[in-house]
Amino acid sequence: MGKKHQKVVVLPCSGIGKVFGALARETAYELVENVRPGLATLTCLPLLVINDPEAVALVTENPVITIDGCPKDCAKKSVEALGKVVDKAYEAIKFYKEHKDLKPEGIAEVTDTGRKLAAVAAAEVAKMVDELAAGEEK
Amino acid sequence: MMDIQVMKVGVVSCSGEEIPEGTLCRLACRKVLDERPGETVTICLPLFIAGGEEERTFAANYPTITVDGCDKLCAAKATEMLSGKPSKSLSIPEILKKRGLAPPTKLRHFGTEEEAAVKAVAEEIARAVDEVLEED
């Protein structure tokens, strides 16, 4: 058992061009607002791009989960660029592949079906949040 | 045959996942991209780090407008630092102040309450696109 954590950082894709980017964000918002408020924490991904000291400290001092919207893996790579290994990396399309009845739509924000899929995804990611907060090695 | 080049303007949005202005920024930028598909193009800001040479030369290939949601100015700074100097830099708080509109208060599920703000920001971006196209 490793060190326990009060925060687990969840970093979604920043994209505004693809539905799975929007799904990644919706999943992260669902986690921080409803499923694990207070434990799951967001920061703006672009803050890492400009090396904002507070955002960099948050990411380097806590476990990090990334949820990317496409294979370019911006969220994961932005964390790795800081020399930090991501604790768990998801690609949002995985959640759709596992729940084909919930096809997400929308680009900047997902519509109703996408919100339902995000709720399912957030419940799955929440288990990982709990394990990382408890200090369990991945 | 005459070679006609169509100039496109790059729009780089703050994604601001942590702040409501970030969502406003994404929605307004998306609106402009959808309404002006022949004249605008975008890039995901983190691709300046995560992407390859093609992504890093974005601001060299297109005159670029950055749109930021807060005074940290990630879009403007990242574009200038990693790709090239933007032609114009817009700020959501300044646009809202100028238009007398209240900042949004939620991170997601924007509706009629936020519609005016999204429209106002999109109009300012579209105006900036026109200005850049006229200059070039």
Image (tube, coloured by chain):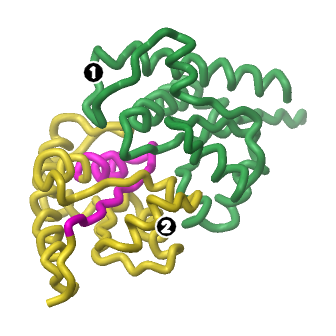
Chain colours: A yellow, B green
Residue A43's place in the image compared with B101, above or below, is below
Chain under label 2? Answer: A
Mark 1 neighbour class, 10 Å CA radius: few under 14, some 14 to 19, many 20 or more: few
Residue at the image point whose x is 21% and y is 58% from the top: A40
Mark 2 neighbour class, 10 Å CA radius: few under 14, some 14 to 19, many 20 or more: many
Chain under label 1? Answer: B
Mark on residue A52? Answer: none
Q: Residue most toward the top?
A: B100
Q: Which residue is mark 2?
A: A78
Label 1: state its secondary structure.
loop
Residue at the image point whose x is 40% and y is 47% from the top: A18
Which one is in front, A54 or B109? A54
Mark on residue B111? Answer: 1
Quadrant of image for the C terminus of chain A: bottom left
Q: x and y percent of residue B108 in the render?
A: 28, 35
Question: Residues in magenta?
Answer: A6-27
Q: x and y percent of residue A64 in the render?
A: 31, 70
Q: x and y percent of residue B45 in the render?
A: 55, 52
Residue A133's place in the image compared with B14, above or below, is below
Type of amino acid at the residue the image marks with label 1 = Gly
Type of amino acid at the residue the image marks with label 2 = Ser
Left or right of B93? Residue A104 is left
